[in-house]
Amino acid sequence: MALNVVIMAAGKGTRMKSAQPKVLHRLAGRSLLQHVLDCAAGLGAGRVVVVTGHGAATVEASVAGSGAVCVRQEPQLGTGHAVQQAVPALDAACDTTLILYGDVPLIRSETAAALVAACGGNALALLTVELADPSGYGRIVRAGDAVRAIVEHKDASADERAICEVYSGIMAAPTAALVRWVRALRNDNAQREFYLTDVVALAVAEGVPVVARSVADPMEVEGVNSPAQLADLERRLQRRHADALLEAGVRLADPARLDVRGTLVCGSDVEIDVNCIFDGEVTLADGARIGAHCVLRDAQIGADAVIHPFTHIEGATVGAGALVGPYARLRPGAELGPEVHVGNFVEVKNSRLAAGAKANHLAYLGDATVGERVNYGAGSITANYDGAHKHRTVIGDDAHIGSNCVLVAPVTVGAGATIGGGSTIARDAPAGALTLARARQVTIAGWQRPRKASKQG
Ligand code: UD1
Ligand code: MG
């Protein structure tokens, strides 16, 4: 069924006390609005309309490229007024319109799809939730089983305020009827606002069926209004990520100290120590072990690889059985083969290390191709950048690079070559030979250190 989605994102978010529009604050690595846009994408919506107002330019810039259309609501005269602004941007060929809030991030596509199905292009379908403390919310007023109206808290009588079934803010409506209803809204209420919720009474008056679907998981319709609520939702969401991983057999040292800001896919017998952050798409193969305080973003870690504490990995792959860290940094394009060792304070960027290669201490490999079983000494670096261009360093299998070498790219070190420690290698070094490029050691016998002239008394 062709679907319009309207995302309301014009509100100020005063309680965030932030210069940044509320809907751009991040939850699990994505903006609140992005979560909602992803939900709309999951529904295969034909048209997505974002209603902007406060911080409109910033919100619109963040939406650019998503395919969504933005309409401005200035000033903000209520949720019904917001939908009025969206009307010209709706696709009339989409017979159902779904209303979502930009600050209610965890609504699942499945839940929204069920509401759209309940609407069926001819009923008004409301997503509701039962709350122990319903204060502040619009109450679902029924006559018998039938929904008659939504009454806002500020307009509600004492009897109505006792109702615990509340409107979540999410509805699905027949597009043509919604357009008709929002045009008919009035603002003769306690807040002098155009309430979208008044469409319920209009539907009832027209004899259009109104159905209420209650959400099974209240977290799906929880809104974010303050930093405290955002942090609280983040922790509960992360706890769910952790519980799902534990359920799948991942051994987390502490489920309360894990952050997944993207997708984390784990094989069997994976262990994750405390305070790790997984961003983007991360895969940990069977038996991988991640030490404490690691940050991994868009990374694939091979089977039985061990990532020691305080390691940063971004845009990199780590082969089976490799050892990385502590305090290592793998930057985009780092590809470590099986059984590679990369130790403390080693930085690798856009470089391939073949099986069994080792760079164990204090080294830099940038734009390099490193053969099998190469030993890359402490303090050695590739000088890959001449101030204008990057150049490659190629090191053949079984080469041994001593400590404190500078490999000035473009340069090739042949297979089995040995480079003496402290060498600056600016020309290719042949295979199988020892190459040294440093001043010869000399000893000057009987040399006297300078002394201060002794003072005359
Ligand atoms: C609204 C509902 C209420 C429901 C509650 C759920 C109405 C009249 N009331 O109340 O029944 O229980 O949500 O959270 O709809 N917004 C705009 N433009 C505006 C006003 C609001 O874009 O002019 C956006 C806000 O940014 C926010 C959403 O609409 O994302 C809801 O607005 P809010 O002021 O929080 O509505 P509530 O009074 O909480
Ligand atoms: Mg609200």
Image (cartoon, rainbow, N blue to C red):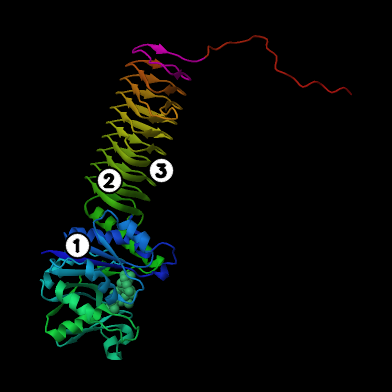
Furthest residue in direction front, as rendered: 88
> Residue at left 72%, top 18%?
450
Q: Quadrant of the C terminus?
A: top right
Q: Would residue 217 be seen by someone viewing this image from the given angle?
A: no
Which label sits on residue 282?
A: 2
> Residue at left 37%, top 59%?
58
Do the numbered discs 2 and 3 sit on residues whose CB atoms are within 8 Å? no
Q: Would residue 62 be seen by someone viewing this image from the given angle?
A: yes
Residue 369 spot, x, y in % from top left: 32, 26
What is the spatial separation of the Cα atoms under label 2 and label 1, in whole angstroms? 31 Å
Which residue occupies the foreground of this view, 206 or 272? 206
* Circle 1 residues within 10 Å: few <14, some 14–19, many ≥20: many
Looking at the rendering, the quadrant in which ligand 1 lies is bottom left
Magenta stretch encompasses residue 195: no
Magenta stretch encompasses residue 435: yes
Which label sits on residue 187?
A: none
Residue at numbered disc 3:
310
> Residue at left 34%, top 83%?
192
Mark 3 or mark 1, which is nearer the start of the sequence? 1
Q: Quadrant of residue 332?
A: top left
Q: Amino acid at mark 1?
A: Arg
Mark 1 or mark 2, which is nearer the start of the sequence? 1
Which residue occupies the foreground of this view, 401 or 119? 119
Q: Main secondary structure of the magenta part?
A: loop
Is residue 207 shown left or right of residue 290?
Answer: left
Residue at numbered disc 1:
47
Dot 2: what SS?
Answer: strand
Q: Which residues are magenta?
A: 419-438
Q: Amino acid at mark 2?
A: Val
